[in-house]
Image (spheres, rainbow, N blue to C red):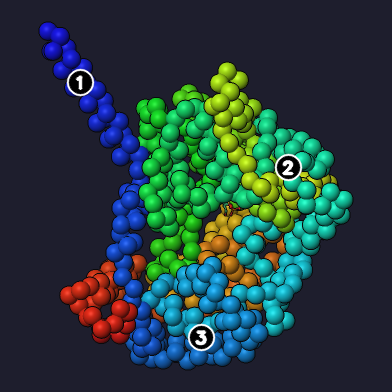
Amino acid sequence: MLWYLAAILIALIVLRKAQLRLILSRGKHRSLAGHARLGRLVTRLIPYYEYDETRFFCADDAPAEVAATRREAFARLAALYTQRFARSAALTREVAPTVSDLQFTQRYRVPFQFSRMVRQHLQGGAFLESSSGTTVTDLDGNRFFDLAGSYGVNLFGYDFYKECIEEGSALARELGPVLGAYHPLLAYNVRRLREISGLDDVSLHMSGTEAVMQAVRLARYHTRRKYLVRFCGAYHGWWGDVQPGVGNPLAAEATYTLKDMDAATLRVLRTRRDIACVLVNPVQAMHPNASAPADSGLIDSARHARFDRAAYSAWLAKLREVCTARNIVLIFDEVFVGFRLAPGGAQEYFGVRADMVTYGKTLGGGLPIGAVCGRRELMQRYREQRPADVCLARGTFNAHPYVMGAMHVFLRRLESEPLRSLYRDLDALWERRARELNERLAAAQLPVQVSHLSSIWTVNYLQPSRYNWMFQYYLRAQGLALSWVGTARFIFSLNYSDADFAAVADRVLAAAEAMRRDGWWWPGTALTNKAIRRRMLRELLQAWWATSSIGSRSSPRSRYSGARQ
Ligand SMILES: Cc1ncc(COP(=O)(O)O)c(C=O)c1O
């Protein structure tokens, strides 16, 4: 009898485990980004190959005259770049061999098959000399409208941050670089962060990545649970546990990557007991379940961003509900969007309160920063009754006096009328600007549209093409500075006037007209996104075959001239 009962019990436990496993599997997104291990494995198998000079201009099987138009246009653009960006490009060439970050960003501006030709001929340079208003100026004296936004740091215009740094430095100068003890400015900064976040306690760090690390560590410490939940595609810095897939050589052992905006995820949260926290990066509202876009991934025109505020707010409300019910710590990672959407950040904008919020980027007034705000019982780093069981977090430069100074000026000005007024009708303003630009693009029958989350924009491409990544080079030629992800992200600062914006819109249109005139958007009837992907898969298989031990051993690099098939 006892054996019988034990067998039933074991069977029930096994069944329950299988059921939980199944629920977890259903919570994973079907894409490779949703399956970190598989994603890493697949990326390891992708072989390098590149297009030779002929194939480069007809990778979409465009007819010879279109390829010739493109070739001439490319040569013209290359000549313009050589002449216009000479000094910036020369210094870039000098340092690139020894600066690994630069080597990476240069290589990954466009899909890898095209990258070598582009790197050789379209050198824009990675250096700038000055900034002012909404513009930046390079070493050759070229002035660009800045759409790169310093990764999101630049919210109020570069002059604003120069003042924060200058005034903040003056405030901190007497104490100088003393660490460990705090500068008194910290008191005001902490008070303001508490007001802005609506949370009890604050800890200060040196980057957004570290702030997220600390928030997750604290959640694990207090819940005594192991797993963090992140959503498919969401970026939370470059620390291993929040980057379980491509980009991290190790598997993250305590991370669940689940589907964004999906009931299956709520089921996982409702049923598992090992989840410490859920991390939300609200910028994912633009592209749930997809990684932050970059033009290196623009192999076709499938990229599509779209923001639905009501739907995302409703999703966050559901997350809040289940996290509360299951004692899971809900963390909003506002390192990017904090202060950009509303004075009270994403919590205010979406009308949902988190247990912890991380901030960074713009908060430092132009200097490096990360901050965690959280409920008191979650922020405490020790247990009253277990004095040896502590949760450590330090970092030599945390709360550096100069950073506290710049942050102080930033937060003070945030309370002032000129800045407060910027938030009034902010959404309506950026909505109007995006709509007007889209109307102009549509009226000119250009295959480009923008979508946006307030002042964060993405370019979508309407017509299947293998050359959309070229658009970033036409935009630069028109005097628009983009980050290394190209047209995937325009990050506007809020000091853009209507006149500034009109100038940007004119340039976007001029760039798109030139791109079309030069034949890059040739509308081949057989050209669909699916056909492009299929063709690429064939090329990948051929390259893999060529570089495998069975294929050619003489050259590790495959050059694809691509006889039409
Ligand atoms: C949402 C989010 N979290 C964390 C980080 C990491 O911040 P940092 O680059 O300061 O380490 C970023 C950076 O882009 C981010 O966008």
Q: CA distance from mark 1 to mark 3?
A: 67 Å
The answer to whether the residue labelled 3 contacts the one labelled 2, judged by CB atoms less than 8 Å apart, is: no
Residue holding disc 3 = 121
Q: CA distance from mark 1 to mark 2?
A: 55 Å
The disc, 3 or 2, on the residue closer to the chain's N-terminal end is: 3
Q: Is residue 107 above or below residue 278?
A: below
Q: On residue 183, which mark appears?
A: none
Q: Is residue 205 above or below residue 3?
A: below
Q: On residue 10, which mark appears?
A: 1
Residue holding disc 2 = 180
The answer to which image quadrant residue 259 occupies is top left
The answer to which image quadrant residue 19 occupies is top left
- Residue 409 visible in the displayed image: no
The answer to whether the residue labelled 1 contacts the one labelled 2, judged by CB atoms less than 8 Å apart, is: no
Question: At numbered mark 2, what does the secondary structure look like: helix, strand or loop?
Answer: loop
**Disc 3 residue crowd, few under 14, some 14–19, many 20+, Cα 10 Å:** some
Is residue 101 shown left or right of residue 243?
right
The disc, 1 or 3, on the residue closer to the chain's N-terminal end is: 1
User: In the rendering, at what x and y percent does residue 217 appear?
Assistant: 53, 37
Residue flagged by tag 3: what amino acid is it?
His
Residue at image position (54%, 74%) is 98
User: In the rendering, at what x and y percent does residue 369 appear?
Assistant: 67, 50
Residue flagged by tag 2: what amino acid is it?
Gly
Residue flagged by tag 1: what amino acid is it?
Ile
Residue at image position (33%, 76%) is 49
